[in-house]
Image (cartoon, coloured by chain):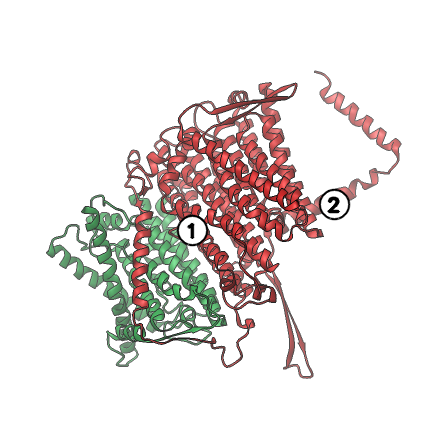
Chain colours: A red, B green
Amino acid sequence: MKKSAVWLGHLFALALALAIAAVAVGVLESRSAPLHVALPKLFPFAEMSLTVDGLSAFFLLVIALGTAAAALYGPSYLGEHARAPVVQTAALNIFVGCMVLVCCAGDALTFLLAWEGMTLASYVLVVSDTRNEENARAGLFYLVMAHAGTAALLVVFLTLTERAQAFDFPALRLAAHDLDGSTRTVLFMLALAGFGAKAGIVPLHVWLPLAHPAAPSHVSALMSGVMLKVALYGILRFGFDLLAPAAGPLPVSWGWTVLLFGTVSALVGVLLALQQHDLKRLLAFHSVENIGIILIGAGLAMVLANGPGTATLATLALAAALLHTLNHAAFKGLLFLCAGSVISRTHQRNMEDLGGLARRMPWTAWLFLLGAVAISALPPLNGFVSEWMTFQALVLGGARLGGASGLLAGVAASILALTGGLAAACFAKAFGVTFLGRPRSTHAEHATESPAPMIAGMLLLATACIVLGLVPGYAMRLLDRPTAELLGGVGASAVVIARGPLILSSSGAPLGLAATSISMPWVAVLFALVAAGVWALRSWPRSAPWRLAPTWTCGMTPTSRFDYTATAFAKPLRLIFAALYRPSSEVVKETGASPYVIRRLAYRGGVVDLVETMFYVRLKCGISASAEAIRTYSTGRIHGYVGYLLVTLIVALLLFGKG
Amino acid sequence: MKVAAHIAVALAQAGLLVLLGPLVTGFVQKLKARLQCRQGADLWQPYRDLWKLLRKGTVQSDTASPFFQVVPVLALAATVVSATMMPVLWAPTDIVPVPLGDAILLLALLALARFVTAIGAFDAGGAFGGMGASREMTVGLLVEPALMMVVFSIAVVGGTTDLGDIAARRSTLAALSWQAPDLLALFALLVLIPAEAGRIPVDNPDTHLELTMLHEGMLLEHSGPGLACLALATHTRQLIVINLVAALFLPVGMAHGMSPVELAVALAAFAAKTLVLATFLGVVESSYAKLRFFRVPQFLGLGLLCAFLSLALRIL
């Protein structure tokens, strides 16, 4: 009974995913007016409606991809060891439905209701998987941060609706046209903060690595791969559309702010990910990094949208950001599903206690490797394509802008290059320690492959990674409509695939600079051919003996303790970036009769998240201190409180009561 | 037809780099030996080593997964494909029919080779492999961004990151139209190429002491044909990096057409440039001690800083 309910629920989510994918592709392929649906009137004071334009449709596609994979994967995963599978299935469906509604909302009310529903449904999923104090705290932290963000959004929406005297987006857009420059910028910064809290932009990221890993793995995939993108949709919707001035350029400060936060998020996210040994937490930190990479593209597009003659580059930057959005949904979803597969078979999240899984769970291992190559921006997979486009936009944009603003683009390009190297190191560690070598716990030793439906979910996303990497030309056509809507001018495909669908070019003819072109399919074919040739060369002397032997461990019996650990792997980086990590370590030696004979050795080490210690801990101390300070005034006597109320009322009347 | 011809040229240039890679290693080894007043093995020794390894049997660790056997193939294939993006003798002046890849893709493919090799090092379950992987990835993540910045610095002028275009553009200009950023970028590259080629002062290709191994630590458990593939990948990588310097800063003498005279000049220029840079590698290797691993970041930081300054000066 329970099992069939779970299956039915996931089938429903799958059907929903297919339906919204169909709608999304339909809208993206067409050039007609946005799809508009009026909703039944829930409140007497407002009409509610759904509008699907190019930007909405593109994000619907992202949601559909993640949801389809999660729906295939979910039933088997929940069937293994879930505590409340039916509740979780219901919450999953509500969660997906709310994300869809946020992206389609045609008015402020629908948007905020769906936004809140998304937060609450995901909160239920975060706290329901395992009942322990850590999860409950993670859920609470998430809820507080999400609502702080929603509060910022409420201010933005209320300011606009108050001016427009209506809730629907076209009216808000008109109202925004009359705003003066500074109010407009303040509203955008508030929106950025509000959506940033959800998207996990540094310094608002601290809840993310706690909450995302706590949910069931396919929900983690949805939260990291899709929900963060919904927040990104908000940033793009407000930045390029709702708050944009009627005519003339976007304010310069917007683009630079987004670019700056993107750069910082990318670097901080990957640096912190490197020092994580919890598989899912490591992946969650990488989401911070990838959101940063997307924001670099989006911010650059905002900056370049202003300048004369940089419209083509702006389109390139925005196309890079949107493509990376889709790519990240594919590879981060894949990695989370693989991590879930490992966790469901071994009940271990700490990679130091895993190892040797490639021989026991081959499908999971190979698919994780594929995701790792993609997320490290290595060719020939999709992560490389969008980062290549981002690099091109940054370098050409920097050259075009020149001066201090060009330099910032150059700095962003340099940091993005560093980020790629760090991500590769991180995933060499994650894959090597988790899947290769010897198993380091009995759980890992007795692991078996996950059931077929789970592998099907992973395969779906793996296929997306390969297809988006090899033939990104088709994805460019899907980006035509959103890029043209947000920036005007020709769409993405006229800029990026001007030389044919198999060739990516960095700049079109209008720019007057030489274009750079690469051809992923040709490179992939060449790679396959060369690899086949090398394989033939390698296995050519058939008569040569081939034997297995234990690894040489300097004469000692090889055990799993000889394997290099994740902590040790990340040690050089801990030392290089010690200023940021502030690493601490403690070694406890237990000696026998002689101090030279060591019986036991215990090591404990850790790093800090500087943002957390510098900002959040101080914030907490400040709040506690001020609470302490007003304690003397909160006496507990009812007369006192009535008195305070009276004073407040009089002050309020004096200040605001005249009108 | 044009497409096929273009791909054939790219493959031929890559083939040249693969074939001559071991010779450059042989030259550096010979030079080192002479500088140390030894006779040394002759220039062809790396080829003999490869031939010997190819015919030998394989001993594989009993903990290794099937992935272990694929590692050498993927690493060599990625290196060879990255070589196809390098203008060696021929830099086209008109638009190529099938662009394969630019400098970013070239560096990314080299990074892929490094990534795959590093992962494979975990598979044998010994500490040396993991240690080598950890160190190599650390060095890699400092070298790769610096190389990217050098490429960006050049790209800011020409608006392209395509190595063929860069080489063609710069070779048609007067060879000494260099500006300050070029000098900084060249200096950065000269600091970085020993690291990328796995040589002193960052790494020592001749040692198998656990405390000094970087790249060799990752190859320790490979044997026979697999080791031959990885060794060939290392030789090729070294020549690619040497050629990167030549293509970015000294693309003189490159052929633009297909006439035999032009190609002969290009071949001579290629040989001369490679000889000079290989001599540089050999002399540096003979005159410096290997740095302690935790001093390496400071050394590479110098390259990183120069590369960044070069980019910054160029944009400003």
**Closer to us: A121 or A295:** A121
* Spot occupied by residue A131 in the image (x, y as percentages of width and height): 70, 51
> Which residue of the protein is positioned furthest toward the front in this rendering?
A1
Image point (30%, 44%), residue name: A516
Instruction: Answer with mark 2 or mark 1, whichever residue precedes in sequence.
Output: 1
> Would you call the spot at circle 1 few (<14 residues within 10 Å), some (14-19), or many (20 or more)?
many
Q: Judge whether A161 appears above or below B191 on screen.
A: above
Image point (53%, 32%), residue name: A103
Image point (33%, 48%), residue name: A520
> Which residue of the protein is positioned furthest toward the top in this rendering?
A659
Q: Specify the subunit that label 1 lies on.
A: A
**Residue at the spot of label 2:** A624
**Secondary structure beneath disc 2?**
helix
Residue type at mark 2?
Ser
Left or right side of A421 for A579: right
Left or right side of A626 for B198: left
Q: Specify the subunit that label 2 lies on.
A: A
Which label is found at residue A69? none
The answer to whether residue A450 is seen in the rendering is yes
Q: Are marks 2 and 1 in contact (CB under 8 Å)?
A: no
* Spot occupied by residue A373 in the image (x, y as percentages of width and height): 43, 54
Query: In the image, are marks 2 and 1 on the same chain?
Result: yes
Q: Nearer the viewer, mark 2 or mark 1?
A: 1
Picture quadrant where residue B220 is located: bottom left
Residue type at mark 1?
Ala
**Closer to us: B184 or A77:** A77
* Spot occupied by residue A438 in the image (x, y as percentages of width and height): 53, 68
The answer to whether residue B180 is seen in the rendering is no
**Closer to us: A78 or B100:** A78
- Real-space CA distance between mark 2 and mark 1, rounded to the nearest whole angstrom: 44 Å
* Spot occupied by residue B67 in the image (x, y as percentages of width and height): 43, 63
Which label is found at residue A377? 1
